[in-house]
Image: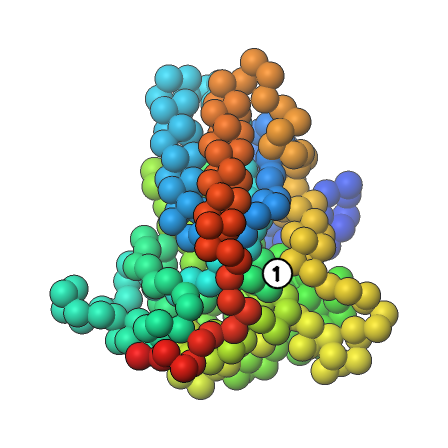
Amino acid sequence: MVSRSITRLIQQTSKRQVSLSSATCSTTNSSASSSLPPLKYHIFKEPLPYPVGLKLQNDIINVRLKAKKDDPVGSRGEGDVVLMLEHTPTYTTGRRDNSPNPNELHPEEKKVQNVGADFYITKRGGQVTYHGPGQLVGYPILDLNVMETSTRCYVEYLQAMLAEYARDDLGIKNVLAPHPDGHVGCFASPNEKFASIGIHLSHRITSHGFAMNINEKPIKWFDLVMACGLNDVKAISLIQLLKRYQLNNQKGSLTVEKVAKDLIPKFGELFSRDIIPLSSEIEDKTEIKQINELVQRAEVEAKAQNQKSNGWPDEPDLSRKG
């Protein structure tokens, strides 16, 4: 279980580190991280259909595993990349969800038949959640072994980063991360959740990650399911919280793209590493070149699918609800 209280991201040097109440996760391993190459990042221009994003993550991991096999020393953390994006309307559930007979629809899927969103069972941790426009999704694909970071601490670091962004950068009050009952994620109160975390590991390389509601668009979709298995917890967005605390005027227009750009440097601070655009460092580096090609291919595929479908619905179509 992650620790129940999250303290501040403290800036003592040129890079900030997470200070947490749990002793084993009190700091990142700065000596290990400082010797690693820069993190790379990419912010997608097109909303990704979920299968495109899922295939991209798997393909990147395959490239990374091959690079590690061919050159364990030279590939050390070279392919670490953070992907920031929106998905088209999609419900997903994790591998540990206690689903019934596989020949029958998942009980939560029955609730959202024909409303305008797809439904997928994935390998990540966690239960049912929603991804779609108005929500920022982050997929860090990181080698935890070379970062000398445990799975538990990695989840706790992500949670702390999102909580600190809401609390310190936006001024949102009463942020709980995790929930008082120990549920992973970021909450605005015991009954309101604005960010979720669900990860998967393949040979200690992470995939999936976090989702944070930026505007109100995802909320009506969340209201149709029991998200994260928490019956008494409802989804809320950052913009709704800014309005609640009368912070929206002084913070300007909060968009998914803006939040993505705000969070990118925090990944570097979080893991004591430089962070640069993926496309800026591909010369003579086969692993990075292959990852960049996969990302660009996903951009093209997403654009083609979005044009073919003529966009996506802003809210569920309840007239056809199953």
Q: Quadrant of the N terminus?
A: bottom left
Name the residue furthest right.
Answer: 250
Q: Dot 1 lies on which element?
A: helix
Percent x, y of residue 265? 69, 45
Between residue 166 and residue 305, name the one nearer to us.
Answer: 305
Q: How many marks?
A: 1
**What is the quadrant of residue 274 in the picture?**
top right
Place of residue 83 in the rendered image (x, y in percent of width and height, measured from the top left): 55, 44
The residue lying at 72 percent from left, 82 percent from top is 244
Horizontal relation, residue 292 to residue 171: left or right: left
Q: Position of residue 169 (x, y in %)?
A: 75, 62
The residue under label 1 is which amino acid type? Answer: Leu
Position of 246 compared to 294: left or right? right
Residue 301, position in %: x, y? 47, 40
Q: Quadrant of the C terminus?
A: bottom left
Q: Is residue 205 above or below residue 208?
A: above
- Residue at position x 42%, y 68% in the image: 116
Position of residue 253 relative to residue 82, above or below, is below
Q: Is residue 247 above or below residue 292?
A: below
* Residue beneath disc 1: 162
